[in-house]
Image (tube, rainbow, N blue to C red):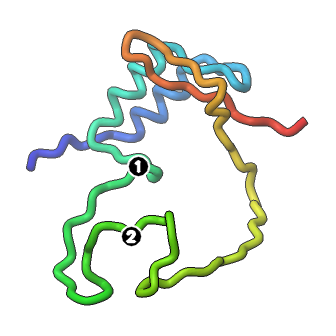
Amino acid sequence: MNKKRVDWSQLAQLKSQLPPGEEGDAASEEEIEQISAFQEGFHNPYNFIPAPSRKQTGELQDEKPSGHASYLKNKWSGRIRVALETITPLLIPDAANLKEIGREKHKSYPIRKLG
C-alpha cells in the first residue's frame, strides 16, 4: 500500500497564515480546502477505524450485539455511575444549529456556551 507522507510542519505554517476568526465563526471554503489537502491518510482520534475480526470462541467471540430492548438471562446488566471533572475546557457541539458550507455541504457546528 502506497501511503502519502504528510509534512505537518507545512500545516502549522499554513495555519499561521490564515486570518484569525472570531469565536464561533466557521472556516471559509478556502480555509477548509487548504487544510483538507494536508489530511489525506490522517484519521482524527474520534473517527472509528475498523478492526479485524478476532478468532476467539465462547464469550469473547465476535457476534451480533444483543440490543437493549430487554434484559437477557445469559447476559450481564447493571449500571456504572461516574463523576466527571474536566481539567481543560470541554467543547460540546450544538448540533441543533449546524450549518452546511460550500458545494460539498461540509457540516460546521457552533460550540455550546454557558450563560
Q: Earlier in the sequence, mark 2 or mark 1?
A: 1
Residue 42, by quadrant, is top left
Frontmost residue, 97 versus 113: 97
Q: Nearer the viewer, mark 2 or mark 1?
A: 2
| Residue displayed at 76% across by 61% down | 87
Q: Give the residue number, with chain letter if any, for mark 2.
A: 66
Residue occupying the far right of the picture:
115
Residue occupying the far left of the picture:
1
Q: Give the residue number, with chain letter if any, for mark 1.
A: 47
Q: Which secondary structure lies at badge 1?
A: loop
Between the residue at mark 2 and the residue at mark 1, the CA separation in whole angstroms equals 24 Å
Q: Is residue 65 left or right of residue 108?
A: left
Q: Residues within 10 Å of mark 2 (few under 14, many from 20)?
A: few
Q: Is residue 3 left or right of residue 71?
A: left
Q: Residues within 10 Å of mark 1 (few under 14, many from 20)?
A: few
Frontmost residue, 35 versus 60: 60
Q: Amino acid at mark 1?
A: Asn
Q: Position of residue 65 (x, y in %)?
A: 36, 67
Disc sitting over residue 7 in the figure: none
Marks counted in the figure total 2
Q: Position of residue 81 (x, y in %)?
A: 71, 75
Of the 4 image quadrants, the one containing the C terminus is top right
| Residue displayed at 39% across by 33% down | 10
| Residue displayed at 61% across by 80% down | 78
Q: Amino acid at mark 2?
A: Ser
Q: Is residue 109 above or below residue 103?
A: below
Q: Is residue 105 left or right of residue 62?
A: right
Q: Position of residue 15 (x, y in %)?
A: 52, 28
Q: Is residue 19 left or right of residue 28?
A: right
| Residue displayed at 24% across by 43% down | 5
